[in-house]
Image (tube, rainbow, N blue to C red):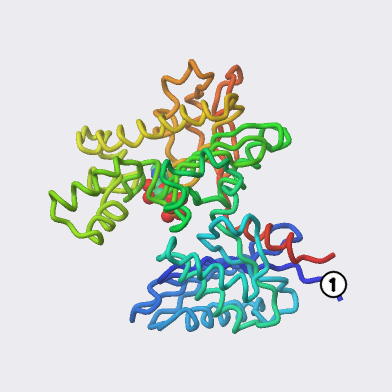
Amino acid sequence: MTSPTRVLVLNSGSSSVKYQLLDMRDSSRLAVGLVERIGERTSRLKHTCLSSGETREQNGPMHDHEAALKAVAEELAKDGLGLDSPELAAIGHRVVHGGEFFTEPTVIDDTVLLEIERLIPVAPLHNPANLTGIRTAQALRPDLPQVAVFDTAFHTTMPESAARYALDPRIADRHRIRRYGFHGTSHAYVSRETARLLGKDPAEVNVIVLHLGNGASASAVRGGACVDTSMGLTPLEGLVMGTRSGDLDPAVIFHLARVGGMSMDEIDTLLNKRSGLFGLCGDNDMREIRRRVDEGDEQAKLAFDIYIHRLKKYIGSYYAVLGRVDAVAFTAGVGENSAPVREAAVSGLEGLGLGIDPELNAVRGDDARLISPASARVAVAVVPTDEELEIATQTYALVGRE
Ligand code: ADP
């Protein structure tokens, strides 16, 4: 019998599950889909089979992740891709927080589940949802290897000088307070793809990766290993994001509590959900913000300028951290699509060897590409991220058999 070559990638959020089924012989996608609003009466599953091009929807209540995953399994089965297929090699799960413990993708057993559970206090929103996804998938296929791929793992190579806050280590360690970083699967994939674009071995190149989606983070990658990243204990630190403030003076929180009379929960919601671009101008979609800027909207212009100012500060500081930079790579929704953001972020950094060719920057496309002039000392690149492919690749590398 031939070895199984398919990997199902599951990304379970608190009320959603995203999934992709890939064939690892050629990394092709067989099916993709999304279940939204799990636990509500208006749950919706949207499933696309790539070989037939057919898209189907299921609408109606899905009470929990078990119901959602069963519905996903049904849709896959209709395309002859069911979870009982002998061609399925493993299920790869995105797990947001792996703490210091998980430095690599890991085959899930009871000890691994326990450790992911122990990390819930530092990832109260994400890890419980990821665990539910894993347990439900295990119940559906108890015999199948399930692999956890952690968002934090790529950042575990950060030196202590970058990973620690300037806090008493006894207090920090007691509460597991340190900079973990997130989006690691994307930073790993994009830094490697950038090296490939330059025709070099990842071990030879230093890259600043700018993952600019609704959530956003930067990382400094030296010779394939992360040495610093902008998100910290939680995804709140760092760049200005769609709805998160990113860096601010921690005393702002005391001030909002003492002078503003806000509760801790209210401040948490303010900083995570009602700040960033949205808090500044009422929109978190960069397309809309740029449209408003082009119409002369001052509030949108200020939001854009604050976003760019922060981005520039991180490019500069990671330049200093790395000493030598071979490439700056833009990725995720904003990074891949917004030429004005890329142009503004790099403008004025000619002294650092950075520049953008406006014509190359204006080209749209799905492939990794250089947008710097041929003469530039530092390459500037657009490198589309593919977290699902990276999860599938890491999963298959762990369980795939010849
Ligand atoms: P996440 O995975 O963090 O939800 P994405 O990486 O999909 O986010 O990025 C989503 C964001 O990308 C949107 O909020 C929007 O600001 C931005 N975006 C998407 N398409 C474009 C575009 N064509 N031009 C500018 N920005 C875009």
Residue 178, given in percent of the width and then of the height, sits at 47, 50
Judged left or right of residue 340, residue 188 is right
The one nearer the camera, 387 or 133, is 133
The one nearer the camera, 237 or 217, is 237
Quarter of the figure with the N terminus: bottom right
Above or below residue 169? Residue 339 is above
Q: Tag 1's secondary structure?
A: loop
Residue 9, given in percent of the width and then of the height, sits at 60, 66
Residue at the image point whose x is 40% and y is 79% from the top: 59
Residue 338, given in percent of the width and then of the height, sits at 42, 38
The one nearer the camera, 385 or 238, is 238
Q: Tell me the residue that label 1 is attached to.
A: 2
Residue at the image point whose x is 40% and y is 83% from the top: 63
* Residue type marked 1: Thr
Residue at the image point whose x is 59% and y is 84% from the top: 139
**How many numbered marks, from 0 up?**
1
Q: Quadrant of residue 379?
A: top right
Residue 245, given in percent of the width and then of the height, sits at 31, 46
Residue at the image point whose x is 25% and y is 54% from the top: 270
Above or below residue 39? Residue 51 is above
Q: Quick one: label 1, few (<14), some, or many (20+) residues within 10 Å?
A: few
Quarter of the figure with the C terminus: bottom right
